[in-house]
Image (tube, helix red, strand yellow):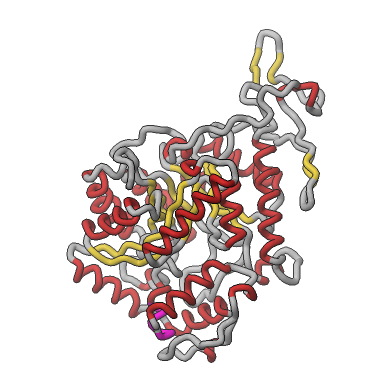
């Protein structure tokens, strides 16, 4: 049962013209929107008008997919967030960054800076980045093994959090009379030496408004769930059925408790792609119109890459081959591979039908209906122990987000499931999470290595 005072957390996952791969072909869509800052500012202001917890940008250090298929090329998301921060006041701002192709110091500095620029609204979606194409952009012939990527990610987060704590909250004295700006003894090197990183520190940015930017994670493999249980404060995940979502929710909450953390300190948000119409028939018609705009030759090629097959091995009007690679042989995006295969097998979909199902949300749940029916679907999973909230993935932007904010959010508010006003000013506050205590707080200065006379 859901406690009567428990409320949903809603994040808007923003992607150029929308999550449906054919959204850019609609008459209303701007195929150049992905590089227009005012497009994203408008979306952020719309989400803020709906009192959503946060907005989120996915990212990868590689040109993903075929440029003929859908708008490709992305602005670097932390840079994008700084521009959006100036156009908004309350909404949280989450960007993806890879632990495989970055270093902890630079990334810790970048997110601390965004936290300062936004007044405490920054979040970091931690990814380990799969695929050989990304590896080759960094002088590596192939991606590191799945387990190695997650081992590195755990140490990466640990180092970043140490760096965020390398300044005490009161390290800046700003004593004009005595001419002392800061206290050397309240800023410390971290002297981290691990398997993957050696980092001296301290960070060259003061401890930010949130202490630590919010840590988000999106992997659902065994390694991904273990990483989330140890470090994540919000988890974006993909499920097609209520039972699968309930199983994931229960499992991850239990892993979080086993890791010595409060399970309420991790918020689980499955993705949902809402196709909304004034009637159910209208919503289904909109979904059908979008699916009919998919070019199957592009979609089949992408599906073949995901399944590690050749496109000719996937005849459009047949079901998936019986002899697919096992999950153990997949080194990247294991959980998404499993979800796609299980969906196709469970519903006995042809390749053409599977392409249609994936075209709207790449494996996330697509739901078509009226605003009340969308609200019902959200409420069902929320009350059934399958979600703490949802990652809202509009199929078309900006219209899909505008309709959700103007017609679904009010229904959720009327049911007492979602806030009518912001009650906090930080992203952590929106998610009901405490500001982390500095790990070095109360530690005598002489027990740590001082940075010397920096001031």
The verdict on residue 351 being magenta is yes
Q: Position of residue 168 (x, y in %)?
A: 66, 26
Is 110 displayed left or right of 39 in the figure?
right
Q: Measuring 45% from the left and 59% from the top, which residue is drawn there?
A: 247
Q: Is residue 397 above or below residue 321?
A: above
Instruction: Identify the residue at the far top of this view.
Output: 177
Q: Report x, y in % for residue 397.
A: 36, 60
Is residue 438 left or right of 375 when viewed as pictured?
right
Residue 15, how many percent across, how many down?
45, 60
Q: What's the magenta region? A: 350-356
24 inside magenta stretch: no
Identified at 30% across, 65% down, the residue is: 275
Visible residue check, residue 239:
yes
Question: Closest to the observer: 186 or 388?
Answer: 388
> Is the C terminus in the top left, top right, bottom left or bottom right quadrant?
top right
Q: Quadrant of residue 350?
A: bottom left
Q: Residue at x 26, y 53 (%)?
A: 408
Magenta stretch mostly in which secondary structure? helix
Q: How many dots with numbers?
A: 0
User: Could you tell me residue 213's position as x and y percent?
Assistant: 56, 40
Q: Is residue 246 above or below residue 166?
A: below
99 or 333, nearer to the observer: 333
Q: Is residue 80 something one can see in this rendering?
A: no
In this rendering, would 166 be left or right of 399? right
- Of 350 and 252, nearer the camera is 252
315 versus 34 height, above or below? below
Q: Residue at x 24, y 47 (%)?
A: 410
Image-based side of 120 in relation to 287, left or right: right
């Amino acid at each position: 049962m859901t406690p009567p005072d428990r409320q949903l957390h809603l994040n808007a996952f923003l992607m150029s013209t929308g999550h449906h791969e054919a959204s850019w072909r609609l008459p209303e869509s701007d195929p150049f929107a992905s590089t227009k800052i005012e497009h994203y500012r408008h979306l952020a202001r719309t989400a803020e008008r709906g009192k959503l917890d946060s907005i989120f940008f996915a990212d990868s250090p590689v040109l993903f997919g075929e440029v003929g298929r859908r708008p490709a090329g992305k602005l670097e998301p932390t840079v994008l967030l700084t521009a959006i921060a100036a156009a908004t006041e309350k909404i949280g701002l989450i960007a993806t960054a890879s632990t495989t192709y970055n270093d902890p110091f630079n990334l810790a500095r970048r997110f601390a800076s965004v936290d300062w620029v936004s007044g405490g609204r920054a979040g970091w979606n931690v990814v380990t980045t799969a695929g050989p194409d990304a590896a080759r952009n960094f002088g590596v012939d192939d991606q590191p093994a799945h387990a190695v990527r997650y081992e590195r990610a755990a140490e990466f987060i640990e180092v970043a959090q140490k760096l965020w704590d390398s300044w005490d909250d009161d390290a800046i004295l700003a004593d004009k009379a005595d001419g002392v700006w800061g206290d050397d003894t309240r800023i410390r090197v971290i002297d981290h030496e691990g398997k993957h990183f050696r980092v001296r520190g301290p960070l060259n940015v003061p401890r930010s408004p949130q202490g630590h930017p919010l840590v988000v994670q999106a992997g659902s493999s065994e390694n991904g769930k273990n990483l989330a249980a140890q470090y994540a404060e919000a988890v974006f995940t993909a499920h097609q059925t209520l039972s699968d979502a309930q199983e994931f929710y229960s499992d991850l909450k239990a892993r979080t408790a086993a890791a010595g953390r409060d399970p309420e300190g991790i918020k689980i948000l499955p993705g949902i792609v809402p196709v909304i119409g004034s009637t159910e028939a209208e919503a289904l018609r909109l979904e059908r119109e979008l699916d009919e705009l998919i070019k199957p030759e592009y979609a089949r090629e992408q599906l073949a890459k995901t399944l590690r097959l050749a496109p000719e091995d996937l005849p459009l009007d047949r079901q998936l081959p019986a002899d697919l690679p096992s999950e153990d042989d997949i080194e990247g995006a294991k959980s998404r591979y499993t979800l796609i295969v299980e969906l196709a097998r469970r519903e006995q979909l042809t390749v053409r039908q599977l392409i249609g199902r994936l075209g709207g949300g790449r494996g996330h749940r697509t739901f078509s209906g009226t605003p009340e029916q969308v609200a019902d679907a959200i409420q069902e999973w929320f009350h059934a122990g399958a979600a703490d909230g949802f990652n809202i993935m509009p199929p078309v932007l900006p219209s899909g987000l505008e309709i959700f904010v103007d017609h679904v959010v009010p229904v959720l508010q009327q049911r007492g499931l979602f806030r009518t006003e912001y009650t906090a000013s930080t992203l952590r506050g929106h998610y009901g999470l405490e500001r982390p205590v500095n790990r070095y707080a109360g530690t005598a200065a002489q027990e740590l290595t001082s940075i010397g006379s920096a001031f």
